Image (cartoon, rainbow, N blue to C red):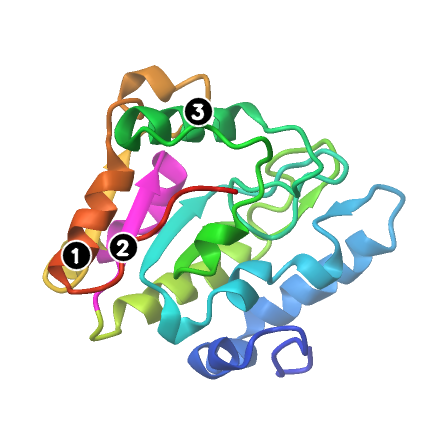
Amino acid sequence: MNGLPPPQLEQSWKEALKEEWTKEYLHALITFLAKERVGPIPVYPPKEEVFNAFNHTPFDKVKVVIIGQDPYHGPGQAHGLSFSVPDNMKQPPSLKNIFKELQDDLGILPPQHGCLTAWTKQGVLMLNAVLTVRAHTPRSHYGKGWEEFTDGVVARLSQREDPVIFVLWGKTAQEKCRHIIEQTKKRHFVLMAPHPSPYSVHSGFFGCRHFSKINELLKKQEKEPINWIIA
């Protein structure tokens, strides 16, 4: 990127994250990704979809942030939005559990597909901690610089005067926000629960009622609540 934001990044995020483009870690990350992309193992999501979360939800439109881990690592699954898959893909187990909690919380029936763009258009930033992954190898792009980049995203959002609701499902999201949780509670809002993975969903994700709680918080701010229905 040579110190410049990628051309496919939405303009308000280019401005919000302008300091990141000059940092050394980002140049190392870009070099690593360039090598990975020309290697024999595919990298997901496609290059043009890596920054989809930002392009779907401009900086000044963010009302809610739902933080995931790294992208799905199966063919065609990842498209740049945490927990989401394109509408022609089978719903992964974690996403099915999200829809089950949504039904238990608000009575909304699970959709036929798993594409969450309807949420992003209403101000829900679906942000993964790491934005790329090697095919069939979860966590393969951890420790390469993405965490620092998305830390910068979280930090920039936390500096906003306009309140943001941070939704932290699982240890990865909670660790990412550990440095802002206390300070953000003064101005922003933090909802925490275990990850919706089948391994942890019964330890407190089911029953967290985060979808209704988000809308209650938005109403208190006199903001439009999220319509969680996926058509």
Indicate which label's residue lies in the foreground, 3 or 1. 1
SS under mark 1:
helix
Q: Is residue 173 above or below residue 204?
A: below
Instruction: Indicate the quadrant containing the N terminus: top left, top right, bottom left or bottom right.
Output: bottom right
Disc 2 or 1, which lies upstream in sequence?
1
The residue that label 1 is drawn on is: 219
Disc 3 or 2, which lies upstream in sequence?
3
Q: Residues within 10 Å of mark 1 (few under 14, many from 20)?
A: few
Circles 2 and 1: CB distance less than 8 Å? yes
Q: Residues within 10 Å of mark 3 (few under 14, many from 20)?
A: many
The residue that label 2 is drawn on is: 225
The residue that label 3 is drawn on is: 97
Residue drawn 26% across and 74% down? 160
From this viewpoint, is residue 126 visible?
no
Image location of residue 48, percent across then percent down:
72, 63
Image location of residue 227, percent across then percent down:
36, 49
Kindly indicate the quadrant of the structure image that contains residue 203.
Answer: top left
Residue drawn 20% across and 75% down? 161
